Image (spheres, rainbow, N blue to C red):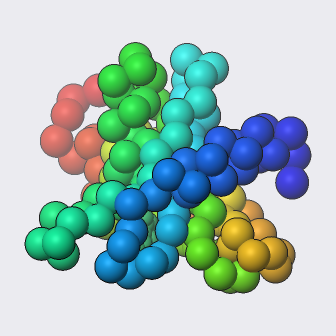
């Protein structure tokens, strides 16, 4: 794991510690390095009305947009257990909105085990994205 990932892991772990997940008890933190050079983190926030819960990645993206970041350069997710916690399908699409295909995604289990080093292209091949709708 390189220095950037180590920094993102620190911030994602801190976010995981703030997760509100009383129903699943599955804690997730996500951290983004943005094109503005800043990092943004988020945690999952569940709700008694289950479908209203937010994933950690969605929270981190909201923090990035509010902080002035425009593009995702790197992402790291960390979650409960010893398996690398990968972004859910919906969050792959959420990340895709702000990331080029080559953006590295590092996935970690808080209890250890080998991290997974992947990319948006691998997680979401043949994806639908902004270029279908926006003229660039
Ligand atoms: N979760 C995330 O925050 N990110 C993911 O990509 C996977 C799932 C959360 C949602 C829910 O609060 C809990 O993990 C169990 O699904």
Q: Nearer the viewer, residue 53 or 115?
A: 53
Position of residue 13 measured from the top left corner of the image (x, y, whole percent): 65, 53
Judged from this view, the residue extending furthest toward the right is: 2
Judged from this view, the residue extending furthest toward the left is: 49
Q: Does residue 12 appear anywhere in the picture? A: no
In the displayed structure, 43 sits above or below 89; it is above
Q: In this view, does 10 lie to the left or right of 131?
A: right
In the displayed structure, 87 sits above or below 26; it is above
Q: Which residue is drawn at 33% across and 79% down?
A: 23
Position of residue 6 measured from the top left corner of the image (x, y, whole percent): 81, 45
Q: Which residue is drawn at 65% across and 81% down?
A: 81
Q: Nearer the viewer, residue 13 or 84?
A: 13
Q: Residue at x 52, y 34 (%)?
A: 40
Q: Residue at x 33, y 58 (%)?
A: 45
Q: How many marks?
A: 0
Q: Nearer the viewer, residue 24 or 73?
A: 24
Image quadrant in which you'd find residue 119 = bottom right
Q: Which of 65 and 18 is in front in this view?
A: 18
In the displayed structure, 135 sits above or below 9; it is above
Q: In this view, does 93 lie to the left or right of 60?
A: left
**Quarter of the figure that contains the C terminus:** top left
In the displayed structure, 93 sits above or below 58; it is below
Position of residue 17 measured from the top left corner of the image (x, y, whole percent): 57, 55
Q: In this view, does 100 lie to the left or right of 96?
A: right
Ligand 1 found in image quarter: bottom left
Q: Is residue 94 left or right of residue 84?
A: left
Q: Does residue 14 appear anywhere in the picture? A: yes
**Quarter of the figure that contains the N terminus:** bottom right
């Amino acid at each position: 794991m390189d220095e950037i990932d180590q920094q993102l892991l620190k911030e994602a772990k801190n976010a995981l510690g703030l997760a509100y997940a009383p129903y699943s008890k599955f804690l997730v933190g996500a951290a983004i390095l943005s094109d503005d050079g800043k990092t943004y983190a988020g945690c999952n926030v569940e709700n008694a009305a289950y479908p209203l819960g937010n994933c950690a990645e969605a929270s981190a993206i909201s923090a990035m947009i509010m902080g002035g970041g425009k593009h995702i350069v790197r992402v790291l997710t960390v979650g409960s257990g010893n398996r690398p916690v990968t972004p859910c399908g919906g969050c792959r699409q959420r990340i895709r909105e702000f990331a080029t295909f080559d953006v590295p995604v590092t996935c970690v289990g808080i209890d250890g085990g080998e991290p997974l080093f992947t990319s948006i292209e691998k997680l979401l091949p043949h994806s639908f994205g902004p270029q279908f709708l926006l003229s660039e």
